[in-house]
Each structure stands twice: as C-alpha cells, then as structure tokens.
Image (tube, grey):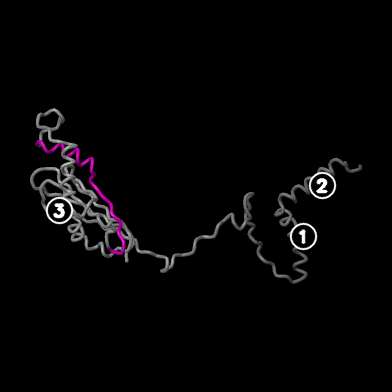
Amino acid sequence: MPFDTNIRNTLIFLVIFILAFFPSIFHILLKPLLLPLEYLSGTTLQPPHQILPTCACCPPSTCYPAPPPPATKANQHEMAWTQKQFTLPSQGRGSHLITPEILSHLPELKTYKLGLLHLFVQHTSCALSLNENYDSDVRADMSDALDRIAPEDVKGELYRHSAEGLDDMPAHVKSSLVGASVSVPIRDGKLALGTWQGVWFLEFREGRQSRRVVATMQGEKK
C-alpha cells in the first residue's frame, strides 16, 4: 500500500519545525547515533555542556548577569552610628547660641570624615534652630518676634490650655513653629556650618529649665 503523501509531508513539516525551534532536541536525538563512532575513534566522552536558557530580549550571556566583584579594602568604608544624650546648661527665657556646648559634649565628632549630626530636644516648650552666630541682637529680635506671634493670654481669650501658667501655651506654639530638631553636615571632623551660622537653643518658658538633647551622628569614619 503506497504511503500517503499528505502524511509524509506533514511529518516532514513537523521535523523541520522541531529542528528549527528546538535545536537542542536534535543534539539529544543525534547523540546515541554518534556514540559508536566516538568509541571507534577513541575520542574521550565529555560530559554534555549545560544549555543555558535564552530569552527573546537578550543573548544568553546577559540573561544571567555576573555577580559583583567582592569588596576590597580600597572600596570599603567604615560606616558608623553614634548616639549620646546630654543636658544643656540651665538658661532663662530667650534665644541662646549653643554651638560651643554642642562641640564640647560631642568629642566623637572629630572621628567622622563625612556624615550628618542630628540634634533633637526632648521637650515641648523649647526649640532648636540654625541662625545668626555673631550679633546677639538677632537672637533678642527673634525672641521678640515670636512673642508677637504667640503672645501670652492675659485676658484668657486666646487659649484653652492655661493650667501651667501664662507662658506655657505660647511656648507650645513657638516650639511647633521653630521645631525640636536640626541636622548639620559633618565634614573632616567638623560641623559644616556656614560662616554666619550657629546652633540655637530657644527657651520659651520663664525660669531656668533642665533640657535634654539627643545627638545622633552617622557617617563614614576617618
């Protein structure tokens, strides 16, 4: 009975299709046929090479990028964190320049080559700021300006909270306006402040208060 031509053509098409899109199958099927020839020729059998998967968007070598090189002493930097808490000297109501006190409490600052100093005051009736470090009149004017923005409520018409004195609620308002923290860059073991910049502590309550500050340093050590 003659072989059906349509079936033959279909088989030939399937073989061509498989070889065109799945060439690895051709190698697998051909391997057993070549084994006797390898034995007769004395060729040492080598383990089959791993066939890497390919993707449509890139060649096989870029489907799996090489891992990064291991870190060496040349590109390793010692990163460190330091945190301390200290108490500022008791000072009366007003704006005070405290840059020297900050430096005296933080000798570890000199060990940092590059980094950041964050200062946070743990109270709700005072503040920290960065401002003029030379003319004391600027600090006096700042205190006066904040008093005009948030005055004491002598007549009892401005604030609900008055249980802790006339100066308490205005102090809370000023603390929110100015802020409880500042951040200063560290460069070569020093604060990278501008020529006329200094760290201010603003006390908004009457009397002398004990105020705690948390200092956090983070960066690259020398």
Q: Give the range drawn in magenta.
A: 165-189
- The crowding category of the residue bearing disc 3, from other C-alpha atoms within 10 Å (few below 14, some 14 to 19, many at least 20), is some
Q: Which of marks 3 and 2 is nearer the N terminus?
A: 2
| Residue 136 higher or lower than 114, as above or below | above
Q: Is residue 166 magenta?
A: yes
- Secondary structure beneath dot 1 equals helix
Callout 3 amino acid: Leu
**Residue identifier under label 2:** 12
Q: Which residue is drawn at 65% across and 61% down?
A: 49
Q: How crowded is mark 2: few (under 14 residues within 10 Å), some or many (20 or more)?
A: few
Q: Residue furthest left?
A: 207
For mark 1, what is the residue? 33
The amino acid type found where label 1 is placed reads Leu
Q: Earlier in the sequence, mark 1 or mark 3?
A: 1
Q: Of discs 1 and 2, which sits in the foreground?
A: 2
Q: Nearer the viewer, mark 1 or mark 3?
A: 3
- Residue sitting at 8 percent across and 45 percent down? 207
State how far apart marks 3 and 2 are (Cα). 91 Å
Numbered disc 3: secondary structure: strand
Give residue 134's position: percent from left, percent from top: 20, 55
Q: Position of residue 73 (x, y in %)?
A: 41, 69
Quick check: 76 above or below 3?
below
Q: Which is more foreground, mark 3 or mark 2?
A: 3
**Chain-order first, disc 1 or disc 2:** 2
Q: How crowded is mark 1: few (under 14 residues within 10 Å), some or many (20 or more)?
A: few
Is the N terminus in the top left, top right, bottom left or bottom right quadrant? top right
Quadrant of the image occupied by residue 98: bottom left
Q: Which of 62 and 33 is in front in this view?
A: 62
Tell me the residue that label 3 is attached to: 88
**Horizontal relation, residue 35 to residue 79: left or right:** right
Q: Quadrant of residue 10?
A: top right
